[in-house]
Amino acid sequence: MKKAVMLPLVAAISGAMIGCGGGGGGSSTPPGPSLTYYTFSFYKSAEVDYNSSSSCTVYDLREDNGDTKALNYYAIGSSLDAFLKAVYSDAEGNQVGSEVSASNGTLKIALENIPDDGYVTLQEQYGNQVFAQSFSKEVLSSDSSMRSTYLSVRNPASQGSCLTGGNDTPTTVTNLAYTNDEDATGNPNIQLYYDSQLETITSTNNTLDSIEGVRNESTMISQYRTTDRSQLFQYGFNGWNGNSMKFTGNLGTADTSKSQIVNTTPTIDLNAIYNNFMYELAELPVSGNQANYYHPDERQGETWAYSMSGSIAAAGWEASYQDVISTTWSISIDDEGLFMSNNANDAKPSVSNETVDVRASIAVDTEKGLQRIAYEQGQGGYLVKHAVYTHISPTVKIPQLDLSEFSSSVADSLRITSSSKISQSYLFTENDKDMALSDFMTAFRHGGDGNVDNDNMSIVKSLQDMRYTLNNIAQTRSYYLHRYDN
């Protein structure tokens, strides 16, 4: 199998109103304030043998000694309610108000109960371990993507029904036939590439009996000037342009002079998004801050997106940049326009009084975008893994967890310090609301037993959801930086 069948978010926007009725004596009490509720529902994962006819939603696929394994999620009912809670914290990280208890595997929090500049923290206790996620009030309210969210649990749980629906349906696409663009000139390589979401087939014929794909996708065909997939000659989609391929007779130049991304063999990935499915168009080798690419006179409903990844001059950092090709067919890897990462260092953030100051590591200020600071702190068999999501800021106050189940000495030993393992991630965008928080969180899903580079309390998104998310990310100008210090 070439790639996983890609993946809808299980979010249904919900809200609630709380009011009071009238009193006696001819007077009435004004209605209470309406509250904006966020619901977080928890599910337990299980890996099973993949069965394409199963109704259970697929959240991941992997190959295991020739067998395909699928990840499903199951309802937990009220079996783990005693181990799940939410707490509100003020700007200083101190808990305020009463904790929110889980009901039937769900935590329901009210945005208005989070203090200004404060946080809400969701946490699960698993024996001597605590897994937690915190969200600043500002970042949680910046878009509606988190109003109804599914998250994973680590505790063993009574297994209920699996989450169902929202799967791509594998299908065999047959009788593919294309014609060459009558305006095409030149001598392309004879190899043709047939791409679906599941496989790539090469052929020297403009016809193909069949290819395995997923329902509703328009598979792609492409041909190149070169023996590799670097210089596109013509391309097309099944059912698009009368199944006539489109000649890419215009030579463009991609500019990387405004990029701080370094790579021993730098390349730019060029992709087409058509009918919500993404396909590879070309991999462009970069030389002397430039890369040549070919494009048609105009697009016909598809979006052209590009990305570049690598590291930066400071050791220990991963980097990537993504954007869409403009209407004038220009490509510019311009991460400098979002953030100057030449002031990043091969250094760990400092920690004092449960405040993380990242400026020793990276000199962020008030740039637009999203930020994740996660830490791992363990002592004597006890362990905390805690991720904090905010907008970009040079300092982040870590909200205190409810560790009342442990002795005070153990609780104190589990607070973040300069010796904690710390993961930091930044997504710089043109505006704070350009990227949905739930989309950003997918970069850290399926943490399992791993380090805090991934969430142990992971957002649950199906493979079909993930396809939509990747399409959103690919079409949003953004610059991603990541670092882990153990």
Image (cartoon, helix red, strand yellow):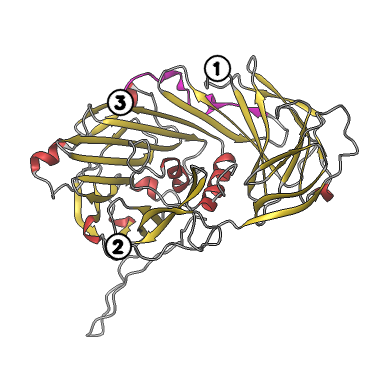
- Extreme-right residue of the structure: 182
- Reading the image, the residue beneath label 1 is 264
Residue at the location (24% across, 33% down)?
355
Q: Nearer the viewer, residue 477 or 116?
A: 477
- Reading the image, the residue beneath label 3 is 349
Amino acid, disc 2: Ser
Instruction: Give the mark nearest the N terminus, 1 or 3.
Output: 1
Q: Is residue 144 visible?
A: no
Where does the magenta region start and end?
A: 331-349
Whether residue 305 sits left or right of residue 8 in the image: it is right
Amino acid, disc 3: Pro
Badge 1 vs badge 3, beta-carbon distance below 8 Å: no
Q: Quadrant of the N terminus?
A: top right
Q: Quadrant of the C terminus?
A: top left
Is residue 475 rendered magenta in the image?
no
| Mark 2 Cα shell of 10 Å, populated few (<14), some (14-19), many (≥20) | few
Amino acid, disc 1: Thr
Which marked residue is nearer to the observer: mark 2 or mark 1? 2
Instruction: Give the mark nearest the N terminus, 2 or 1.
Output: 2
